[in-house]
Structures are given as C-alpha cells and as structure tokens.
Amino acid sequence: FYFANGRYDWDEFQDWDSRWSGFGGVGYQFLEDEKWNLRGRAGLGGNQEMGGAEGDEFTLEALLGVEADYKIKDGHSIAFTNYLYPSLENASDFRNVTTFDYIITIDRDKGLALKLGLANEHDSATPTTSKKNDLTYYASLIWQF
C-alpha cells in the first residue's frame, strides 16, 4: 500500500515552539487475520522546527515503521507502533517514536471508542540542556466514521 501523513506539534516545553512534518512512501501488510494486524512502512520526508534555540531548521528524514494490533476479545484491543526517523543529513541524528495503546469499544454502531496510551519520543539531536526522551500518557475519545 501507499501512504502519506502529516503532523503538527506545538509544545512549549521543548527546545522548539512548533514543528510540522510530512512523509510519504510504501507499506506492506505482513499479517492480517481476526486477531492480528501487522504492517510495515518505509518512506521519505522531513520536519521543520520553528522557534528553536538554533532558529528555524528543516531536516530531511527517512521513515521506517512497524505497526501491530491485537484483538484481545470482542471490544478490547491493544496497538503498538514504532517509527524510526533517521536524518538524511547527519547519520548520527535520529528520532524514534513508540506508542502503546489499549482500545475499548464503547458503541460499535456509532463508532465510539476509548483509547488509553503511552507515547515515547527520543530525539538524539536535542541539545544537552534538554531531555532526549519525552514520555507522555493520554486518554482519547475516538469517533470513527
């Protein structure tokens, strides 16, 4: 399959004020049955940090990712993703984003679900004055249509 994605982040606690990123590429469905869904992705893109200590900075990056979903029982599932973003400009710089989610279906007919999760982002290029790992937790109400 083919994919394209974009993202905008605003975080006053980072060494940048805001960041946008965009990627496109190809993916492969390794496994899909009634319990498991396993996919891989590879692509190219970049991210633009604005308001950082080093000024506005654009970085070309590759994307390598894996996504896994497992249905525990009817209405309950877990999901894991890991995306590696190696810099195409400096071989020692990379970002790595990992998520783990527990998803509970509230109303299947209306497409409502509750998602509880953890996300960790590691940025090797972060200045030494900032933390390189950013662990967050979240709860989301999902409406699928």
Image (cartoon, rainbow, N blue to C red):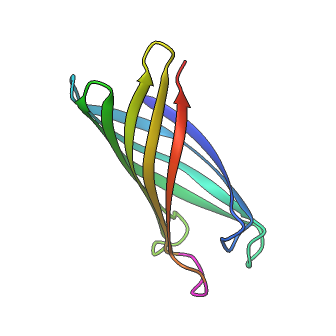
- Which residue: 32% across, 26% down? 75
Locate residue 42: give its quadrant.
top left
- Quadrant (top left/top right/bottom left/bottom right) for the C terminus: top right
Image position of 68 with respect to 137: above or below: above
Q: Nearer the viewer, residue 134 or 2?
A: 134
Residue 81 belongs to magenta span: no
* Quadrant including the N terminus: top left
Residue 67 at least partly seen: no
Q: Is residue 26 left or right of residue 45?
A: left
* Count of all numbered marks drawn on residues in the image: 0
- Residue with the most extreme bottom position: 129
Q: Does 55 sit left or right of 28 as displayed?
A: right
Residue at 31% over, 35% down: 77
| In the depicted structure, whether residue 115 falls above or below residue 132 | above
What percent of the width, then of the height, locates residue 103? 39, 37
Q: Position of residue 59 (x, y in %)?
A: 62, 62
Q: Residue 144, image x and y in percent?
A: 52, 23
Q: In the displayed structure, would residue 10 be above or below residue 52?
A: above
User: In the depicted view, which residue is nearer to us: 52 or 120?
Assistant: 120
Question: Which of the 4 quarters of the picture holds residue 127?
Answer: bottom right
The dominant secondary structure in magenta is: loop
Extreme residue in the top direction:
109
Looking at the image, the residue that sits furthest to the front is 106
Magenta segment includes 127: yes
Residue at x 49% of width, y 74% of height: 124
Q: Residue at x 51, y 64 (%)?
A: 87
Residue range of the region highlighted in magenta in the rendering = 125-129
